[in-house]
Amino acid sequence: MLEMRPDCERCGTDLPAEAPGAFICSFECSFCAECAETLDDICPNCGGELMDRPTRTAALQEKYPPSRERRFKS
């Protein structure tokens, strides 16, 4: 199950689990669409490819909650 991190690691933009527009690498580093495009879809942390992150419906978030740990370092 994906961790579903709540924010872009580069700019801090919120990335709700139920909303499209988030990108992840194989280590689940998470970025918004704008940052992923700026990074040319390459993760700056591991060099992996950034891919569209699937969404998680609100109904399933109670049973399988997304992460609340924010990764953005201002």
Image: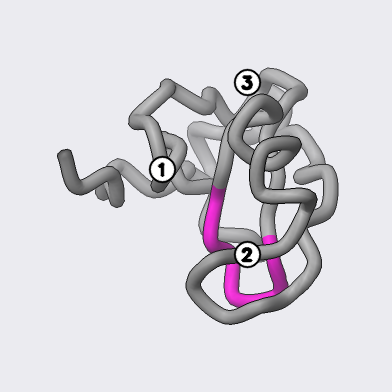
Q: Which residues fall within the magenta stretch? A: 25-30
Q: Quadrant of the N terminus?
A: bottom right
- Closer to the chain start, of discs 3 and 1, is 1
The secondary structure making up most of the magenta span is loop
The quarter of the picture where residue 13 lies is top left
Separation (CA) of disc 3 from disc 1: 25 Å
Q: Position of residue 4 (x, y in %)?
A: 55, 48
Task: Give the residue number, with chain letter if any, for mark 1.
Answer: 10
Q: Quadrant of the C terminus?
A: top left
Is 25 rendered above or below residue 72? below
Q: Position of residue 41 (x, y in %)?
A: 78, 53
Q: Is residue 48 left or right of residue 5?
A: right
Residue drawn at 42 percent across, 36 percent down = 6
Mark 3 is on which residue type?
A: Ala
Q: Position of residue 7 (x, y in %)?
A: 41, 35
Q: Residue placed farthest to the bottom in the image?
A: 46
Badge 1 density bin: few <14, some 14–19, many ≥20, Cα 10 Å: some
- Residue 57 forms part of the magenta stretch: no
Residue 58 got which mark? 3
